[in-house]
Amino acid sequence: MLNKCRTGKIGGALDPWLHLIRQARKVIQSEPPEIATILHPVVEEFFTAQQTGGRTSERQLELNGLVDAYLMGAIGVKLGADKAASVCMRLARRMSKGAAAPSVHEACGVVFRELVPLVQSMETPNTPTVLDILVMGCFTLDTEDGRIGCSACVGAIAAVLGIATLKKTGVLQTITDAVSDSAKDAAKKRHGALACIGNIAAFLQKLFEPYFMPMVPKLLDACSDTNKMVAEMGVRAGKQAIANLTDFGIKTMVPKLLTAAKVSMKAHNACLDLLGAVLTNLKVRESKHTSSLLPKIIPVIIESARDIKVAKMAQERLEQISDMVSHPEVKAVSGKLVAGLAGDEAKAKAVVDDLLNTAFVHKLDPAAASLVLALSGQVMAQRGEVRRKGAALIAGVAKIAADAELMAVQAQTVLPELRRMAVEAQPDIRRAAADALGALGDAAQSEIVGFRELLASDSPAERSG
């Protein structure tokens, strides 16, 4: 096998060769250390021959990397800490050259996780550590694939060493500082640092959360970076981190996203993208904070749906929320409901009629209640009979909603319009608003003082309301 790799007789698809190398690795792993001792000089001779054999093709380079990672890695595990440290350094230097293929990046990540536990110390006096070499590769390599590959290896090593070690050695601070490096030629550095954050988050999952949250302001700034490559990596890293946040982390993250969305249009668009990861997290975890977060998220999405540049993404976010609905009656009209929230007034009116004519049997789940109440608030801002219907829908939903916390939060978004409707000239509008306010109960208590003051008003409509 090694002879064919060396002589270039490696035609056909790469997969059979990759399978063969992996099988050879399994053999080394299953045999006693003596086999590794015998094979070690054979593999070393292969690389020596490669170095003196002239120019090599991209296919040969890829296979060389796979042999180096999988076979030398397995040999290093068998031969102990000293050899493991040597192989780690060797693979780090290979990665730092930037020529390794994605399959080699993956192989190195797997092998680092096996070798690193065997190494008592990955550094000697006046010698850079494996992590130093990989992080420098993340910052300086010319190719995106090369920087991403090095960052994946940093994440793999972090999974073994633990985040506390990265903090103690200063590696984490180096990466964090690089995210906000504003030098003119620092785009590659910012991109690589963000890739590191994303991969560390992916490998460490919720263990990274306490260290990630202080980085969020820098990451959100990076998401609107003037360099498109950096901005895209900022969003990618954010998604990787958000996917692994706990309930507490998500609850902390959402206000930061909604605040950042107001900074600029570019930041707004990036935050809308990141909200997709938030919604996925809420659904997967069946988060207890869904009730309190959806009423804050939905208005931002609805506003975005009016912008032609991000209307498609906003529609996708609304569809994500509709996928979280378990209530059968609301699920049945979710298509029209989403279209209405996205700006289709005809479908908004139609779905309001559908819901008013529905005999609800089940209590509303948080996603269903959030979408229906958001639609009610939207149609109440329009003209005509649909305003009364919107208020009537709020009254109906308030009576069957299963979640008092959701109603308390959502009520704040519809109270201003209900307050205006309650003192309008048309009696049916006033009555509908009063019914809705009454159904909201404690959630509408803040309006009592204002309505008491209106009892002394000169306007008959206001006194009646």
Image (spheres, helix red, strand yellow):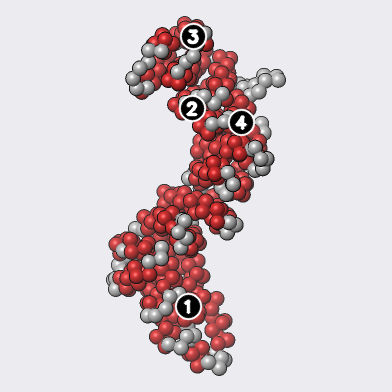
The answer to which of 170 and 301 lies nearer the viewer is 301
Disc 2 to disc 1, C-alpha distance:
58 Å
* Percent coordinates x, y for residue 188 in the rendering: 59, 36
- Regarding residue 46, the answer to whether it shows in the image is yes
Up/down of 321 relative to 172, above or below = below
Disc 3 to disc 4, C-alpha distance:
29 Å
* Percent coordinates x, y for residue 352 in the rendering: 35, 71
Disc 4 to disc 2, C-alpha distance:
17 Å
The answer to which of 257 and 253 lies nearer the viewer is 257
| Mark sitting earlier along the chain (2/1) | 2
Which label lies toward us, 3 or 1? Answer: 3
Disc 2 to disc 3, C-alpha distance:
24 Å
Q: Name the amino acid, label 4.
A: Thr
Tag shown at residue 105: 2
Q: Please name the residue shown 37% across and 19% down the image.
A: 17
| Mark sitting earlier along the chain (3/4) | 3
Q: Name the amino acid, label 1.
A: Leu
Please tell me how crowded label 2 is: few (under 14), some (14-19), or many (20+) other residues with Cα within 10 Å.
many
Disc 3 to disc 1, C-alpha distance:
81 Å
| Residue marked by disc 3 | 53
Which label lies toward us, 3 or 4? Answer: 3
Disc 4 to disc 1, C-alpha distance:
58 Å
Please tell me how crowded label 4 is: few (under 14), some (14-19), or many (20+) other residues with Cα within 10 Å.
many
| Residue marked by disc 1 | 418
| Residue marked by disc 4 | 140
